[in-house]
Each structure stands twice: as C-alpha cells, then as structure tokens.
Amino acid sequence: GLTYTDYSVDLDLTIENNSGKTLSFVSGSLGYSCNSINGYMVNDGYLNCDVSDEKKANDSISFNYDTLMLYGIDEIADMEIGFSMTDEEYNTIYSGPRQLKTSAYDTHNYSADHYQETITSHAAMSTYGYEMTCFSNDALYDENGVKLLSSGIMKNGDGETVLLLELENTTDSMVYLSASDIGINGLVVNSSIWSNDAVNSGKRCIVEVLLSSVFDPAYWSVYGITDIGSVSLSLGQRNEDGLEIATEIPVEIVIPGVSAEFDTTGTEVYNDNGLRIVTKAVLADPSDHSANLYVLLLAENNSGKTLTIDDVYDSLSVNGYMTEYSYYSQELEDAGAAALVIQLRESSLEENQISSPSDIQEIEIGFEIKEGYTAIDEPTITLFF
C-alpha cells in the first residue's frame, strides 16, 4: 500500500522469502537502481532488508515530496521498482523493474512533459527559492535512441549553479547513461565519469550536475571564472552488461548574454609536444575541517591529439621531502584546456612541518603524458614559490 507522511510518500511492502536461504533485498542503491515514478527515473526509494528463509518482513520505500514536485509529480499514477536479491555466498538475482499502478493510472496524462511545465514555472521557483538562468528545448543530443529533451541551468536557494539535462530512452532496453568531461566556460574541470544513471526503456531521467561539487568555487577565481557562461560535458551509453553501445558525445549548454571566459596565465613549468602547463596557485583547504593544501595547475593542449596527463606514482616532494598526495588523471582533447588539481595530504604535511601555503618553497612531481596507451613524455616538473 501507499502511505502519505508529512514529507514523503511511502510504498509499504511485505517481503516473503521461501528460497531456502537467507537473502538481502536491496532497492535504489548506487549498485542497482531502476526505480521510476510516472515515467521519470528517481534516485529516491532506498531499501535494504535481510529476510531469513521461510520468514517475512515488513518494510517501506520512501520518496521525498520535494524531489517529486520538482519533477512535476503531484500524483502517483504508477511506480516501477526493482530489487537485487543476494544470498550469503554473494550470488545475486536482479528482479528488473516491476510496475505498480494506482487508481490515478487510467486518467494520468503521460503525454504531457510535467517536468518542463514545473521546473520553468514561477510558482515552483518561488516555492523552492531557485532561478532558471537559462532553459532550452534544443536537440543537442540524439544518439542510439536516447534523446535530450531539455537543458537548463539553475541557481538554487544556496546560490549554487546546477546543470539539469532531461533525457528520454526510446529504445526497448535499459541504458546506462554516463556524464564525464565536465567543463565550465570551456575549461575542463573533471574528465572522469561524474554520474552513471540507469534509464529504463521508455522512461525519462534528469541528469543533475552540481558545479560546486564538481569543482570547488574557491578555485574559480584562480582560473579567472567570475560568471558561468557555458557548461559542457560528454554523454556516453552502456548496456546492462557494461558494454559500450554509444561513444561519448560532447554537449555544451551556453547561457545567452554571459561571457564564457577563463584565465590561462601563470608560471610556465612545461611546454613540449604541443602541451603547455602553468602553475596557478597553492591554496589552503576552503573548509574548516581539513588542513590539506591544493596545488592548482592549468594545462593547454595544442598537439593535434587527445592527451592524457597522469602522474608517476609516489613521485611528489615538497621542499625536498616526499609527501603523500592525491591526483586524478585528466584527458584533454586537442585545442582544450583543463584544470589540474593536486591535493597535498594534511598528515604528511604535518610530518614535514608544513602548515600553510607560505611554508612551501618547492614542489617536484613526475607526470606521464600519453596518447592513448602510448607514453610520449615523462617529465619531472619543479614548481618554485
């Protein structure tokens, strides 16, 4: 049955296990999530319930009202819920989505785009305290039966910028849709896979990219980003077995009337093979909960090739002392620019009596520059401060 609380609609379930073994039932997890309501994929709906053999359990799956309302869902016409069922030997069966219909199913208008009607309405903006700085129905992506229906850039109540993409899977199979190579004003700030959303056959999903989570706003001014004039990313597709069914395609959303700029200046520390790297700054952790330091670099690729900038493992030293760090590889298309961020770990800095950026005189790190799987250079770069 359905129960309506002050904050959520809850799907109440009884789970009966007659499999001959104890099972863990999971729904809406990062590992397996295929839940939808009224044709829209939803991230809510988490359940984790262990049931012994020949026993029953009562549990519920909750869907937050605020999330549903921003999707334009003000009534529950149908739900599709899926479960993974795992035994104690880690053998898993996946149910796939199972549809539940309510009394509103026969009268619900599935042909209307309830999400677009709601997200652009002044009533929703006033209620939830956000602003749509741009919204478009331009067909920027149509690949392998997956179509981009709308794109928008929102400034939420906290002043954070969010990219929203509405996509529809018109194929007969579930598609896993990945978002990577996220850029702000043409500067790539994260080349790894940011999200990976399951989209059931015939369903729509909303891909959300919170830019402050992708790239800390404390870094923006260092790279000359004062206004957001464009946001870009690459969309790729895989099937349920993890096999690629559509190569990554770049998509760029441009905010009309806003200049999309970033700053390429800095102290040059490498310029070879068509790749240029400059030092921008060393910053303290912007939060109050960490004493990590962050080294900010910028890379420009004019090699005519796609290059990957990786680090040589355990190669970084600060003031001559080996220092633990984190760095995520960046892939950079020809004529592109990317932010390179190196995190210097607090515990290692303390051991070497470094507590602030002003304590750093020199950083040395080894990079591996590759075209595909072929290394074309392995420079050791020294940064002086």
Image: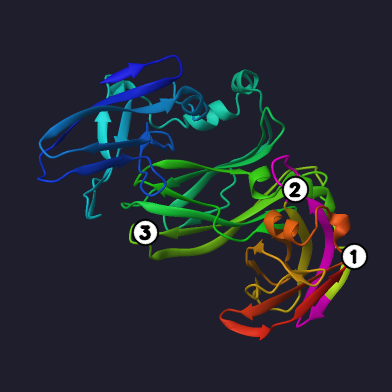
Which amino acid is tagged 2? Answer: Asp
Quarter occupied by residue 265 = bottom right
Residue 88: % across, % down: 22, 50
Which image quarter holds the N terminus? top left
Numbered label attached to residue 239: 3
Q: Which one is earlier in the sequence, the residue at label 3 or at label 2? A: 3
Residue in view at x 84 percent, y 55 percent: 357
User: In the rendered structure, does residue 273 fall within the stretch colored magenta?
Assistant: yes
Quarter occupied by residue 3 = top left
Give the number of callouts: 3
User: How far, Cα to Cα, is label 2 from label 1?
Assistant: 18 Å
Quarter occupied by residue 380 = bottom right
Q: Which residue is mark 1?
A: 385
Which amino acid is tagged 3? Answer: Asn
The answer to whether mark 3 and mark 1 are in CB contact below 8 A is no
Q: Which residue is mark 2?
A: 285
Nearest to the observer: residue 92 or residue 373:
92
Which amino acid is tagged 1? Answer: Phe
